[in-house]
Structures are given as C-alpha cells and as structure tokens.
C-alpha cells in the first residue's frame, strides 16, 4: 500500500511542478465535465482556453481581466508569506472603488489634470483603511484576521449597494442603481486605441517589479519571509510581528484599492451595485498558483483571467452555464492544494504484510 512520508525539507522541484500538474489535471477534469454535459470536450476546451486568444481584441481583454488579479495577488502574497491571512481583498477592492469613485463624482465638473491623481490616491486610501481595520483588531485584540477581513468584504458590498441605490444614484439613469458616468478627466488613459487596455496594466506591472524588489532585495522582505517560515526565530531576532501585520495589510489593502479604482475608472466608467466578479477571492488562488512570488503571480493572473474570458466565450458559443468559470477556478485550487502535499511528503510504497508474516 502507499503511504505519505514527511520530507526533511520541502521539495523545490515539486513546488515548481505542482502548479503545472494542477493545470494539467484541471484540463483533464474539464474533458470529463464537458462530456457529462453532453458537449464535445475538444471543441469545448478550444472554445474555453484557445479561442479567446486567437484575436488581438481577445488578447487585450485577457490583459484587462488579469490586471486587477495581478494587483491584488501581488499584495496578498506579502501577507501570506508572513502568515497574515488577508481574505478580505474583495472588500478592499470595493472600498477602493467607492472612495475613488466618490471622488470622481465629487469632481465631475472639474476640468483639470489633477482629477485623475486625486481619484487614484483616494482609491488607494480606501483600500488601505479597509485593510487597517483587521490589522488593528489582530494586533490589539488578537482577533482572527481571516474572519474579520472576510466579513468586512460583505460590509463594503452593502455600502456600495446603498450608495448606488440611494445618494449616489444617477438622477438621469431611469431609476437604475448606478452612479453618473465619470468625466473624461477621471478616466484612465487608453493604451491601445479600439480596446479597453488602459493605464491600470502599467500599475500592475510596476507593482510586480516593486514588490519583487521589496521581497528579494530588502531587509523588510527578509523579515516577512522569516516571520512566516520560522516565527520563533523571528521573535528571537527581535522582529516586530505587529509592525509586519500592519505593513502587510496596508500594502495589500492599498493595491486592492488601486485595483478597484482602476477597474471603475478604466473599464466601467461608473459605480454599479457590483464592480467585481469576484476578483478579490480569485486573487487568493492567483497568489498561491504563483507561489507567492510576484513574477509567478503575473503569469498566474493571466491564467486565471483566461477562465473569465473563456467562461464568457463558452456561454456565447456553446451555451455553457455561467457557473463553469467558478467551477474551473475551484478545481484549479483543489488540485493545487492536493499537489502541494507532495512538496512536503514523499509517496512511499510499502508491501501489505499478512498477520502471520508480521509475527
């Protein structure tokens, strides 16, 4: 029979190989799922994973969808490295959209190049404030940051819903729950004419570069790693865990807030009852699929963005339900966690012995 034997240290080769294996197993599972749904599995896989990339517009849409995932995922990777479990990026994303979007509405009549920087800064600030709440509760009362950050996500969504149904609803919007359209001065510049590719993508690439340098080239990045891998050693070395909790929540909250305002000022152009299809939660998968490495998060964000684009394409082309997107994202996470076991444990075969042989 097969047993799991704990390794002395994690296998570096398995840490690299397990995301690839998880993706391969996800595709294999997709073949089975499409067959059960009475769809041609090969055509379905092509429609879901390949067809969106066959046009220039589809490729730019992939980058647009990946932008918030990369921004949020890079921020989350910092906290996860230090065992600070920020599960509320969805709320921080939403509050960034609210704070930045509210600023855009307040300055809607202003024709100044200063409007966009103000909108972006307020978006970042909104995400930071929402990330500081669980940081305060954790450091002051030792409250579980998983629960507090997650519950705050639903509070943020309710605040957004109240605003677009009430004081911020567009008077000329035929009673639809939406804000006024933002002025051109509050919108992110388009990078490629005829597409939705905007300046938010540049922010995402810069965040990858900056956080990579922070984690790999600075003392602070070293402290994040040590606190996560060896808390006792970090305490003995005098590292301030409370400070690292605050910093990780501020950075991840700020990047999630930037992602939120980049979404509403870059692609939507107004506030709606829901400004996210679940980017904050999907980014958790992105962070782990990218091995908590900013460069890995960049590629993982593109892969997970493909599930959004592919899911929309599959709905139109072959009539698959909208839930297929979440299904594939969940399957990837399931297989990734399962494959990661082999990085910590070695599979051993032990012959089954009969009772008389053991005697």
Image (cartoon, helix red, strand yellow):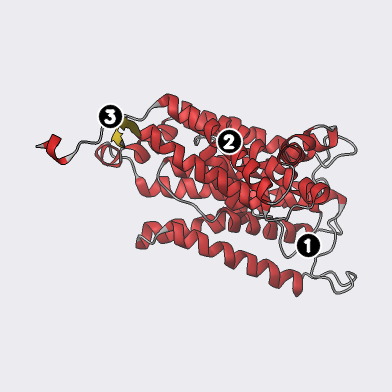
CA gap, disc 1 and disc 3: 58 Å
- Residue 80 image point, x, y percent: 45, 44
| Disc sitting over residue 23 in the figure | 2
Badge 1 or badge 3: first in the primary sequence: 3
Residues under numbered marks 2 and 3 in contact, where contact means CB atoms less than 8 Å apart: no
| Disc sitting over residue 8 in the figure | 3
Tag in front: 2 or 1? 2
Tag in front: 1 or 3? 3
- Residue 225 image point, x, y percent: 40, 35
In the picture provided, is 31 more to the left or to the right than 50? left
Q: In terms of depth relative to the viewer, which is nearer, 120 or 194?
A: 194
Residue at mark 1:
106
**Quarter containing the N terminus:** top left
Badge 2 or badge 3: first in the primary sequence: 3
- Residue 58 image point, x, y percent: 81, 37
Q: In terms of depth relative to the viewer, which is nearer, 129 or 347?
A: 347
């Amino acid at each position: 029979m097969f047993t799991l034997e704990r390794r002395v240290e994690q296998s570096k080769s398995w840490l690299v190989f397990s995301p690839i294996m998880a993706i391969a197993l996800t595709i294999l599972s997709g073949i089975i799922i499409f067959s059960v749904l009475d769809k041609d599995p090969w055509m379905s896989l092509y429609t879901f994973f390949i067809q969106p990339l066959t046009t220039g517009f589809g490729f730019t849409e992939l980058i647009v969808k990946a932008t918030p995932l990369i921004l949020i995922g890079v921020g989350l990777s910092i906290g996860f490295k230090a065992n600070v479990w920020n599960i509320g990026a969805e709320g921080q994303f939403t509050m960034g959209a609210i704070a930045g979007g509210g600023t855009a509405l307040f300055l809607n009549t202003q024709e100044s190049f200063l409007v966009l920087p103000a909108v972006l800064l307020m978006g970042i600030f909104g995400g930071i404030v929402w990330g500081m709440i669980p940081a305060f509760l954790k450091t002051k009362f030792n409250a579980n940051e998983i629960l507090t950050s997650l519950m705050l996500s639903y509070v943020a969504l309710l605040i957004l819903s109240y605003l677009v149904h009430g004081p911020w609803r567009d008077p000329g919007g035929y009673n639809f729950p939406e804000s006024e359209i933002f002025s051109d001065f509050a919108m992110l510049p388009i990078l490629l004419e005829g597409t939705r590719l905007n300046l938010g993508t540049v922010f995402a690439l810069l965040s990858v570069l900056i956080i990579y340098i922070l984690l790999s080239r600075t003392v602070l990045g070293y402290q994040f790693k040590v606190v996560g891998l060896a808390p006792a050693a970090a305490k003995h070395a005098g590292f301030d865990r409370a400070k690292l909790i605050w910093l990780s929540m501020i950075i991840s909250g700020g990047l999630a807030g930037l992602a939120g305002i980049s979404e509403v000022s870059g692609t939507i152009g107004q506030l709606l009852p829901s400004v996210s299809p679940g980017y904050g939660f999907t980014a958790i998968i992105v962070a782990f699929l990218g091995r908590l490495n900013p460069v890995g998060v960049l590629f993982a964000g593109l892969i997970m963005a493909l599930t959004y684009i592919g899911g929309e394409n599959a709905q139109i082309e072959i009539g698959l339900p909208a839930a297929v997107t979440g299904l594939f994202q969940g399957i990837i996470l399931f297989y990734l966690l399962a494959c990661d076991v082999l990085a910590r444990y070695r599979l051993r075969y032990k012959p089954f012995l009969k009772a008389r042989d053991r005697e």
